[in-house]
Structures are given as C-alpha cells and as structure tokens.
C-alpha cells in the first residue's frame, strides 16, 4: 500500500458532461480514506500558476447533475514549452502532493506524462472527453451525453426537414474521430453519415454523397434527407459541403453546425455512473501504488491502461454498425 495523504486534481481540455460527477466521486472516496484533495483551476494553467483550493465533501454536494466543471477547464499552451511541465511539477512538490489526478483527453494525458519527468509523486488519468477517442476504455466520460444531445437536436431538425422536404447536413464534433457522428447518425436514422472512418470528402469526390441523395429522391420521391457530417471531413466544413452539393445537384441543402452545444448539459445516467466508478477506482488504485496509468472501463470492469498508450488511436468505432451503415447508405 502506498502512503497517500494529499492529492491534486484538475480538469483539462474540452470539458465533458460528467466531469463534476467524477470530481465528486474522487473527493468523497478520498475523504473516506482520510486523503486531502486540492483542486487546481483552469486545467494545467492553475497548476503552473498555483491557482488552487482545498476540496471538501461539502464542496461537491449537489454537483453530480451539473455539466461543465466546477474546477473550470482550459487548454494550456505553456505545457508545450520546456518550462511549463517543470513549473507544474514544482507546484506539486511545493504543496507536498503525493499524487495528481488528471481528468481529460489524450492531449491532457500527454501533459501529465511531461510533468512526470520532473515529479516524484504518482500520476493517474481519467478519460473525460465527449469525443471518446481514448484507448483503454470502452467509453469516455461525457460521450454518452454528447450522443443524446446531438440526437435531440437531429430529431428536431428532422421535423423541420420533413415539413420542408429539405436536405440537411448536421455537423457534429469528434475532433479526428467519428464516434459521436456514427452513434448519433445511426440513432437518428440519418440517411448518410460522413466521418473519418468512412472516408473524408474532397470537392473531387462529391459524387460519393450526391449519388445516394439523388437515388433516394428517385426511389422515395421528395422527402427529408439528413446527412450527419463529422467535423473536419470536408474543406470548409458542412457549410461549404452543403453549398457544393446544392451546386452539384441543383437541390437546396441546409447546414446546421451543432458545435459546443454537444459539450454542455446535464450528464445522463450512464455518464454519472461511469464518472463515479472511475473516480473511486482511481483513488483506490493510487493507494495500491498505480502510476502513469489511466483508469478506464472495459467490459463493465474498471481497469488500468498505460497513460502513454491511451492516445495511440487503437480504439475502433463499432465495425458492425460501420458496415451496416455502408450497406444501407450505398446506392
Ligand atoms: O475535445 C472535445 C472537443 O469538443 C472536440 O470535439 C472539438 O474538436 C474540440 O474540442 C473543440 O475545441 P475548442 O472548444 O477549443 O474549440
């Protein structure tokens, strides 16, 4: 057993619904083990600049249902310099922290690995990002809520698309992966899904998307048509793609970029449960001496995964659904 008395926590990168539930779980579990918790504000910026506060169980009362993060989040350019990770490690040493828990995505975990070069305590990561692009866990905290948020929006767009018999392109987030696009696209019954795993588009490649639209119009007559497009899949995004399709087939297309709406809102039950489980598990694993690992969940079981490997992009979006989507969307 490692002797952990004081730990630091922070949330970093794009915030995700369930981060608060995770903070709460860490603080409550730590209190149960007589461990003090220091919360750093604004991601790694707070660690570098010494912006922190003690977190007691009453500070995390009634936050399990809140989106965002009570610790605030940020990206931190200083972490990409030589000095940033050193300064972060210095704060940890000065505050006599035995360990640091980082809730974020793989970019945040890279920061944690850089700090580890200068810090003698333990470091663990917890996967918090709507994108689900972290290896070593079936789902990241926030992903399930983001799907439902996107789904709610697409269902509403379907109503107006139906009323006007229009073609809509709905752009969803995901950085460089199609987890949200595929899931929300399948669940909303979108006619087409464009995501990196199904191949990005270029202006020379437009036929790939216009042919299915034209076929659908021929087979079904005029009707609504929804194409879910993951971000960064076409130069200029879905607005440019809608214009290109309109020009190519002569039927007006509308684009709707959902944007940061997908990051907000109250976490759904699955995210609250995952966040609670992983927060508790991370504290328990710290006590067992875990270091430079990520606390994830695979097949409903909490497990550790090397932090270093969490960003290798090995996790594949559901091949079964991918194949099905290709089958039904093809002409
Ligand atoms: O990492 C989550 C995420 O929301 C991505 O899906 C998106 O590409 C990115 O963050 C947007 O980042 P920012 O809020 O810095 O524009």
Image: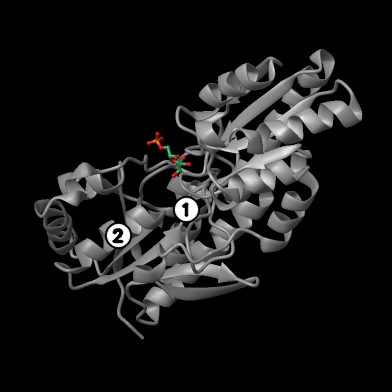
Furthest residue toward left: 83
- Residue occupying the point 51% across, 48% down: 131
| Residue 304 sits above or below residue 138 on the image | below
Give the camera-side residue of 196 and 22. Answer: 196
- Residue occupying the point 42% across, 41% down: 70
Q: Earlier in the sequence, mark 2 or mark 1?
A: 2
| Residue 108 sits above or below residue 252 on the image | below
Q: Which residue is mark 1?
A: 128
Quarter, ligand 1: top left
Distance of mark 2 from mark 1, alpha carbons? 14 Å
Q: Which residue is mark 2?
A: 110
Q: Residues within 10 Å of mark 1 (few under 14, many from 20)?
A: many
Q: Does the rendering let one see residue 170?
A: yes
On the rendered structure, is 122 left or right of 16?
left
Residue 151 image point, x, y percent: 70, 37
Label 1 residue SS = loop
* Snapshot quadrant of residue 229: top right
Label 2 residue SS = helix
């Amino acid at each position: 057993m490692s002797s952990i008395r004081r730990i630091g926590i922070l949330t970093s990168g794009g915030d995700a619904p369930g981060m608060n539930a995770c903070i709460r779980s860490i603080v409550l579990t730590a209190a149960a083990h007589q461990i003090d918790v220091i919360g750093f504000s604004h991601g790694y910026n707070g660690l570098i600049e010494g912006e922190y506060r003690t977190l007691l169980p009453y500070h995390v009362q009634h936050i399990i249902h809140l989106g965002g993060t009570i610790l605030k989040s940020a990206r931190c350019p200083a972490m990409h310099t030589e000095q940033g990770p050193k300064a972060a490690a210095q704060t940890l040493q000065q505050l006599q922290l035995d360990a640091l828990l980082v809730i974020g995505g793989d970019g945040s975990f890279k920061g944690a690995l850089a700090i580890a070069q200068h810090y003698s305590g333990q470091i663990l990561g917890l996967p918090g990002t709507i994108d689900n692009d972290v290896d070593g866990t079936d789902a990241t905290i926030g992903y399930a809520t983001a799907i439902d948020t996107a789904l709610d929006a697409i269902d509403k767009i379907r109503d107006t698309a139906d009323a006007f018999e229009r073609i809509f392109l709905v752009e969803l987030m995901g950085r460089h992966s199609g987890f949200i696009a595929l899931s929300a696209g399948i669940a909303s019954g979108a006619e087409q899904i464009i995501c990196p795993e199904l191949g990005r588009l270029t202006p020379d490649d437009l036929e790939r998307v216009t042919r299915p639209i034209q076929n659908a119009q021929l087979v079904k007559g005029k009707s609504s048509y929804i194409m879910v497009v993951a971000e960064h899949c076409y130069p200029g995004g879905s607005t440019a793609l809608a214009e290109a399709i309109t020009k190519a087939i002569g039927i007006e297309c509308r684009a709707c970029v959902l944007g940061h709406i997908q990051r907000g809102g109250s976490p759904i039950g699955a995210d609250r449960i995952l966040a609670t489980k992983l927060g508790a598990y991370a504290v328990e694993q710290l006590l067992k001496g875990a270091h430079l690992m990520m606390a994830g969940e695979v097949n409903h079981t909490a497990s550790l995964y090397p932090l270093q490997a969490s960003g290798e992009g090995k996790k594949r979006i559901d091949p079964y659904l991918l194949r099905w989507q290709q089958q039904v969307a093809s002409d």
